[in-house]
Amino acid sequence: MDSKELLEVALKLHGHKCPAMPLGLRAGLAALKKLEVERASNKELFTFCETGYAHATMCFVDGVQMATGCTYGKSNIKKLAYDKNAITVIDVKNKKAVRVAPNPEFQKKGLASEFVQLRKKGIEPKDIPPEIVDPLVDKIMNAKDEELLRISELFDYDFKPQKGTFEWYECERCGEVVFAHKVRIVDGKKLCVPCAQYPEQVGLW
Ligand SMILES: [Zn+2]
Ligand SMILES: [Zn+2]
């Protein structure tokens, strides 16, 4: 996918047009370029993302997922919740990593933009006119890496991903399938976490 195509697909996934998502795309693409790797189809890459759960610019992570192929579904991405927008992308096999952060000068200008002022007033991104958001997105998609980002040198990173299990049990209370790592034994019975913790609520979800 070229970057235009990537942006189109990413917009479908993300749901609205905003500057933070494309910034995540660019950060992810810059990490791949520095590592000299392709987007992960399996779990060739792992990403630590410094974004958190309740702050501006979290949309960044959707762009990162699209660019790197590190996704919450495959679980080869993890939020560190530092409430920052940087990522560290690890080439698992070659044990190399790179950290990519927005250039603070660029990010500060973005945070002073009309788009962000409207967001602060509670206007949803989809209700912000294209004449305000489109130039921001174009600028981010076309800026030079060094204008937009800070890209570290490669460094060694020996990352050991947790091995996924295929072993499963039928919970002896709700009858649903639960994978082995999270089975709980209560009074000799194998239970899923909700049944072990809140047995009185079984059947409510
Ligand atoms: Zn967004
Ligand atoms: Zn259960």
Image (cartoon, rainbow, N blue to C red):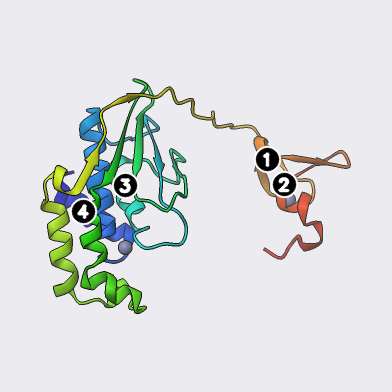
> Residue 142: x, y in percent?
10, 52
Horizontal side of 83 relative to 35 (left or right) equals: right
Residue 175 visible here:
no
Mark 2 burial class by Cα count in 10 Å: few <14, some 14-19, many 20+: many
Mark 2 CB lies closer than 8 A to ligand 2: yes
Residue at 55 percent across and 32 percent down: it is 164
Q: State which tag comes first along the sequence, 2 or 3.
A: 3
Which of label 3 and label 4 is nearer to you? Answer: 4
| Label 1 element class | helix
Pointer 1 residue: 182
Q: What residue type is labelled 3?
A: Val
Pointer 3 residue: 64
Viewport quadrant of the N terminus: top left
* Picture layout, residue 44 above or below residue 115: above
Q: What residue type is labelled 1?
A: Lys
* Picture layout, residue 30 above or below residue 22: above
